[in-house]
Image (spheres, rainbow, N blue to C red):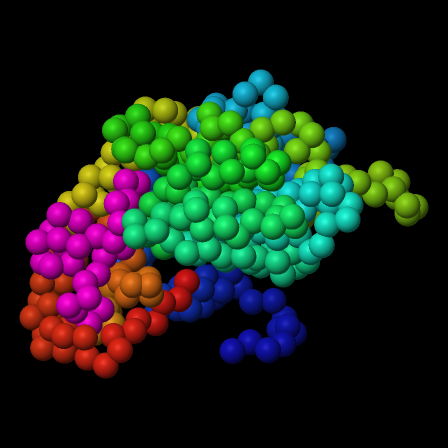
Amino acid sequence: MTTRLPAHGIAWEELQRQLKDASSNDVDWRGGRVPMFVHYAGEDVLEVAKQAYLMYFSENGLGPRAFGSLAKFEAEVVAMGLGLLHGGPEACGAMTTGGTESIFLAVKCARDRALARHPGMGKPRIVMPQSAHPAFDKAAYFLGLEPMRTPLGEDFCADVAAMRAALTADTAMLVGSAPAFPHGVVDAIPEIAELAREHDIWMHVDGCVGGYFAPFARELGADIPDFDFAVEGVTSISADLHKYGYTAKGASTLFFADPASFALMGYHFDNWPRGQYFTHTLVGTRAGGAIAAAWAVMNYLGKDGYLRVTERVMATRRAMQQRLDALGLPTLGRPELCIFAFGSPLRDMAAIGKGMTARGWTVGYVNDPPGIHHMLNLTHEPVVGQYLSDMAAVLKEPQTHARAGSGKVDARY
């Protein structure tokens, strides 16, 4: 392990060898054995993202005066995203570095609006279903809000009645997911938005997973509720480009229904010798490559390209669900998009996961109820048969037949 800067530079050939050696024990994501972390839409798409990123490797999104092309690309990416999510004539937004930053900024905006409208309110509260992403709790921790998680319904979707019961005069934000990460189901966004309208509360839709998947899935027949700006009362939407937009890592979008809400996102400062400083985002420097790659991939794929990839991902999910159900491992809830989880109270899901791990699969889990989790992309398509064959073999192992001990799984990101 290197602990000090080398006294003399090392040749690139040697460094390249060390890089390859260091990755030798990493899971080969191209082999379809990783349940999340990578979103792949084909070698051609990956190459477009790489080349566009490299063309803007040194440019900085912090400097639109110097790099006007990046400002142009960002504006066009935002416009394309708003077009997919039914943004009205006043809708607006910006690119961020990822879903956590998008959510963090949405929470910041909701907090600021609530405090401005209700100066005497106590500690602002976020009311969200149990399945909401931990980024909301992280934002609440840093921004001084109280997170309140409410129970899910039997369908693993948000229980809107429970959310209503959790409202207080200090509630600054309501959250719904499209879809929720644990089970891949879409919350009843219209009902949550109606609740937000009744009480004049900021309503955020976490579309980090589904923002660039669900619009195409619906066109292909997915049965999900309205979830975007077509729903009156939705204030903001987070949508990750580097997930199902298939762009380079470090790219998300945060959209707002109106300019007044968007204005709460930025930060302006001029009380120092260098003059005006302004950013829309939390970070200052932004990789120009991530912005350029997002623009290039979206234009390369186009609507027809996204429809083709989405259809293949959904077909992979349906094939896995059908075969797993036949093996006695039904799907948890009714996911219609790209994420699903499965399990059975008659099986020890921890033992099943260990068996699959022993066969070379990286296993993702959900813990309530115990199950196995998948977030699908095109790397999984060619290995469905092998996965199901290995699963059938694991299910024959005695330790999986009954819930030995607690059957608890070690669910982690």
The prevailing secondary structure element of the residues shown in magenta is loop
In the rendered structure, the answer to whether residue 131 lies left or right of residue 63 reads: left
Quadrant of the rendering where the C terminus is positioned: bottom left
Return the x and y of residue 32 as percentages of the image width and height.
26, 54
The residue sitting at 24% across, 39% down in the picture is 314
Q: Residue furthest front?
A: 165
Is 79 drawn above or below residue 15 in the view shown?
Answer: above
* Magenta-colored stretch includes residue 347: yes
In the rendered structure, the answer to whether residue 185 lies left or right of residue 268 reads: left
In the rendered structure, the answer to whether residue 343 lies left or right of residue 296 reads: left
Q: Look at the image and give the residue range highlighted in magenta.
A: 321-349
* Magenta-colored stretch includes residue 397: no
Foreground residue among 89 and 193 = 193
Residue 385 seen in render: no
Return the x and y of residue 333 as percentages of the image width and height.
26, 49
The residue sitting at 54% across, 31% down in the picture is 233
The residue sitting at 50% across, 46% down in the picture is 164
Q: Residue furthest bottom?
A: 405
Return the x and y of residue 198 as percentages of the image width and height.
56, 34
Is 284 drawn above or below residue 305 in the view shown?
Answer: below
Q: How many marks?
A: 0
Foreground residue among 150 and 90 = 150
Residue 370 seen in render: yes
